Amino acid sequence: MWKMIAEKELRDHLQSTRFLVAAGVSMLLLVMSIWMGITHYKARASQYEQGVQMMLDLASQQSNWMTVTNSAWRKPDAMEILSNGVNSDIGRYSDIGSGRDVRLVRSEYSDDPMLAAFQFLDPTFVILIVLSLIAVLFTYNSINGEKESGTLKLVFANGISKAEYIIGKLIGSWFAILAPVLISFLIGALLIILMGVDLNGSGWGRYGFFFLASVLYATCFMLLGVFVSAMTHRSSVSFLVLLVIWICAVLIVPKAATMLAGRAMPVPTVDEIESRLTSYNTQARIEFFNDMTKRSRARFKSMADMKPEERQPAIAAFQTENEAKRKEMEQGITDYSARIYEDYYNQKSRQELLAFSLAKISPASQFQLATMKLGGTDVGMKKRYEDAMKQYKVQYTDYVQKKGGGGFQMRVSTGRGSTTGSMTGPPQQKIDISEMPKFKDPDYSFGTSVTGALFDLGLLALFNVFAFVAAFVVFLRYDMR
Amino acid sequence: MDQPNILEAQKLTKVYEDGLCALDHVSFSVKAGEIFCLLGDNGAGKTTTINLFLGFLNPTEGIPFINGIDVTKDPLAAKQHVAYLSDVVMLYPNFTARQNLDFFARLGGKNNLKREDYYNVLRQVGLQEKAFEQRLKGFSKGMRQKVGLAITIVKEAPAIILDEPTSGLDPKAANEFLAILHKLRAQGRAILISTHDIFRAKEISDTVGIMSEGKLLAVKTKAELEHENLEKLYLDYIQGKVAA
Ligand SMILES: Nc1ncnc2c1ncn2[C@@H]1O[C@H](COP(=O)(O)OP(=O)(O)O)[C@@H](O)[C@H]1O
Ligand SMILES: [Mg+2]
């Protein structure tokens, strides 16, 4: 019996103008957003290649490792196509070198404010807004509409149980919503292949999970729609109720949660931290110079009655002492900066945890967080890259040191060397960059992404179970007259 | 008549949650080949009676039987023996007449009917051929009612319950509708109709039950009504001039 109902429900949808228009629009938007994602990704990929190549070309022109400006670039991941997440918010590369802090700079939003103003229309966004709306649109009158048209009584004048009916109804509606999503994702996959995006097995796996997340998300709103429809007796009422629920779940809860968490757990802004660092930096340098001036005065006084041949080692000793002090000062600054940033990240992650926990009552947030994890564009992305780049910086500076560079002293001597133009040696040899360590993007495998998304996917699934039980139970008590 | 009782109401009583007694010990029966008409004003309790037969409501007291099956005990089994048409018949607007019929036929247990079988039933109820494969969206109330009647016919159930079937129909459509009822009666169905239309009631029924404020005041056969003015009788009854 339930099969009959499911079939009827599906056919009823397929034959309705409402379905054709809504499914058509959602498929168009979804496919378009995937296409735009691919274009965006390919542009980013070629930008990345160029950036890295330019940096390497420039480096290979140098004759001394000290003059190399190395930088580490974020390699675009094809999964950004599905979920852009924080991708456009964070910088594309960071300069790498001793005395340089690892900092991702030049984000897409900073380069292109238009993009920031209108946000990025990625598949996640389309599904978040459009698919949930459509699921609601398909189901807001699924029960009370049949009551209004008298068909509910007509159906139940036959030997069919309420349980069979609601199961059939849900399955039929589910297929109606599944159809446009499935078709869009298949076309999307085709586009990915045809447009030459190199997606590996892990990528396709994540694509599959993204599809699963989308289906779970749409199912949530479908069940919610049936539930509300079975709670009310007029479809105009259930439509309004669902609209309010939709606005809260999709538009308000995620933003309100972030704001609330910001209020409850204030975290200093990056600007505040930078200015704190700068003032510490200045203070440390002033102290260093004051100290140096004092010491040099004392030195000169003591050197006044030295023989010229004694002066030379004295000056050298003074220089070594100075260098040690300077190193100490710089170490102090680095330590302070590290401490402050660690503090900042700890506070920030606690705030994020609070915000997300609050937001997660909404399936929209559950979906968004899951897809960002799947796409690798979650809020942890920046730190993941900065950590990898910090590691790379150590590796790189070690390498440069070994190649005979390093520190303040060298810079002075190269300066002197170039000004005096030592012509004794062979013409300056270009450095060999072939063995220079390369930056490797932080590992973000299929396992990592899926494990990361699993909790939110689980929540989404749990929400589905609750909504299903609610719709089922409420319908069993539904007054059919 | 020695026909069996197909529909039977035994002291049906319904008190709604708000305390209103919509039905007060109503008893009657409808035999095979009989048209029984529940005649009463709006709010008399006709729809309540029908809802009890279909298990949409549970009686406060009394038992409704369909084909000898206690509806309160085994509603699903009982409903296999009844075809029903409600007063609001919108049906599925996105489905064609044939698709609507097909869905309800299979729901009623008729699984192997062919397209031509459906067309035959639709012809029987007098729907124009060109409307068979048209969506119900553009149908008039009369056309929808015909499809609704086709749905009740196609189930081939021994009992048929119609709630205010002719309200909203123009006279021609109503007449056609009643002609079909006569055919069904000839086939031996037990038909229960509710109406507030005295003339139609007299015209078509074998038995008329006069209802008012939840009470079945009188049950008159066609023979008994032959020499009576039903309208006067009806008004007398509901004004309490004649003791029930
Ligand atoms: N769900 C309900 N709750 C309370 N009273 C009801 C309900 N449904 C109907 N009634 C009342 O029961 C009485 C009989 O209604 P109904 O059977 O629909 O009458 P009819 O079909 O003869 O016009 C009316 O007074 C109506 O107001
Ligand atoms: Mg009524």
Image: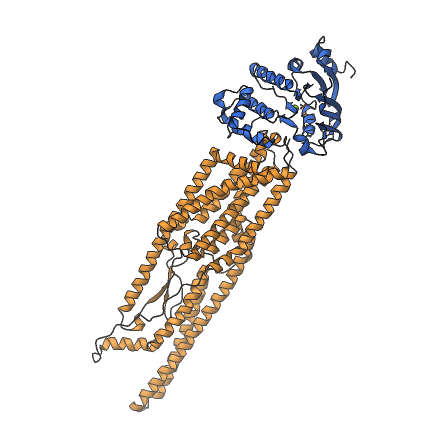
Residue B233 shows up from this direction: yes
Vertical placement of residue A396 versus A479, above or below: below
Residue A243 shows up from this direction: no
Q: Which chain corresponds to the colour blue?
A: B
Name which residue lies at 40% across and 80% down.
A324
Q: Which chain corresponds to the colour orange?
A: A
Q: Position of residue B124 (x, y in %)?
A: 55, 20
Q: Quadrant of the N terminus of chain A?
A: top right
Q: Where on the picture, by quarter, is residue A198?
A: bottom left
Vertical placement of residue A421 versus A358, above or below: below
Q: Nearer the viewer, residue A83 or A2?
A: A2
Q: Position of residue A156 (x, y in %)?
A: 63, 32
User: Would you say A252 lies left or right of A105 here?
Assistant: right
Identity of the residue furthest to the top in this view: B227
User: Would you say A223 lies left or right of A186 here?
Assistant: right
| Ligand 2 falls in quadrant | top right
Q: Position of residue A155 (x, y in %)?
A: 60, 31
Q: Position of residue B66 (x, y in %)?
A: 70, 27
Look at the image and name its color scheme.
by chain
Q: Quadrant of the C terminus of chain A?
A: top right
